Amino acid sequence: MTPWSVGSPISKPIEQAVEETTGRPLNGASWSEKIDPTQFLNALTRAGHDKLKTFAVGVAAYQEHPHHRGMPSPDRWTAADTLPILDYGGSTKGQPVLVVPSLINKAYVLDLFEDRSFMRALAAHGLTPYLLDWTDPSHFDAAADLDSYIEQALIPALEKIRHVHAKPAVLVGYCMGGTLTTAPAVLRPDLVEALVLLASPWDFHSDSEGLRQWLSVSRTVLETTIDTLGQAPVDLVQALFIGLDPTLVGRKFRSFAAMDLNSDSAKRFVVLEDWLNDGVPLAGPVARTCLFEWYLNNATINGDWRIGSTVIKPQEIACPTLAVIPSRDRIVLPRSAESLAHLIRGSTVQSVALGHIGMMAGRRAANEVYEPVADWIINVASQ
């Protein structure tokens, strides 16, 4: 069977479209025998033009929309001196929780809306949540590597929490932040009461062959860009993640074009899209580690990722661990996150039918993620 044979995976959708368009069943015949090629090409061109036009309308509507995120900024935790830690209040006697976001997008996705804020939900449950807001690039110079982020920000933050609260923190990591939390859990278990991993990748070769091929082919260009600029710029990082789902941008803006622009859904779309476009460049050494050591060489699962001279082995993590894995995630594929959870002895795995961003900012996030995570932390802290 060739790709264009009757009933093949490529030909089948075309056959269905032809039957719907002509109103006549193909009855096993080739679609090309039932439709004039010129008419088909013209119809295909019109459909493409219509989609492109709708996409452009959606982009323009987003760019001109007056709504913006109006959330109040939390205070910086004064006890943390110069460390970039945001204090979300909560109970003064509650279990301290340090939440670690990804390095790629800014931390406020964890506090995006008044009614969809992971950080404020933790505080409402009587916990004492802090957010390590290291995605402000001014906190680290262009030569910073992952060792710097772990040793100069994450571990000192945990030390300060233990000093002030006289107890270790529960460490929560989202996306790449979850991958990074494994380092202090291995290096300084005395500072980590428990670990919560939210869509945190570990096996970077799980279901990622297309991305790896793209990185391999583009490596020379990527390395030249990183060497020249001293960083991986925001546009480069965004292009990488767009490649994980190439049709997403078109789909979402065509959908936005059809929305009532005064609706709550439209306003939330604008806030979320503003956050997505408010990216952070990666320092050169960090970009090299993530793109080449992690994604290309799978250094994490192969036991080659080190902080200093210590290999980070999840098998050595002994604290209670909860892994929340969104089954509809197209950024961190579920099997990548599952590989980390399965390496940690006694870990609890919770699957949720949400996407990567939806688990933090979607309408079902509060019931399916915030509440169960807070309850789990409270239960661990009470033991």
Image (cartoon, rainbow, N blue to C red):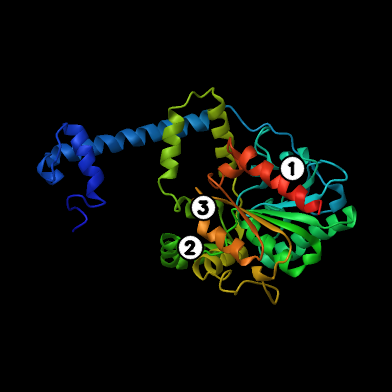
153 relative to 362, above or below: below
Determine whether, in the image, residue 109 is placed left or right of residue 244: right
Between 286 and 323, the one lying in front of the other is 323
20 relative to 139, above or below: above
x and y percentages locating residue 265 in the rendered image: 54, 29
Q: What residue would you read off at disc 2?
A: 206
Between 46 and 193, the one lying in front of the other is 193
Q: What residue would you read off at disc 1?
A: 122
Q: Which mark is residue 331?
A: 3
x and y percentages locating residue 164 in the rendered image: 89, 54
Report the mark closest to the observer, 1 or 3. Answer: 1
Mark-to-mark CA distance, 2 and 1 = 32 Å
Residue at 65% x, 70% y: name it: 315
Q: Residue 137 carries which label?
A: none
Determine whether, in the image, residue 325 is placed left or right of residue 173: left
Mark-to-mark CA distance, 2 and 3 = 12 Å
Residue 213 visible: yes
* Dot 3 crowding, Cα within 10 Å, few <14, some 14–19, many 20+: some
Mark 1 belongs to which amino acid? Leu
Residue at 77% x, 62% y: name it: 155
Q: Secondary structure under badge 3?
A: loop
State the image quarter where residue 190 is shown.
bottom right
Mark 2 belongs to which amino acid? Ser
Mark earlier in primary sequence (1, 3): 1
Mark 3 belongs to which amino acid? Ile
The outermost residue toward the left is 33
Mark earlier in primary sequence (2, 3): 2
Q: Secondary structure under badge 2?
A: loop
Q: Secondary structure under badge 1?
A: helix
Between 86 and 59, the one lying in front of the other is 86
* Dot 1 crowding, Cα within 10 Å, few <14, some 14–19, many 20+: many
* Image quadrant containing the N terminus: bottom left
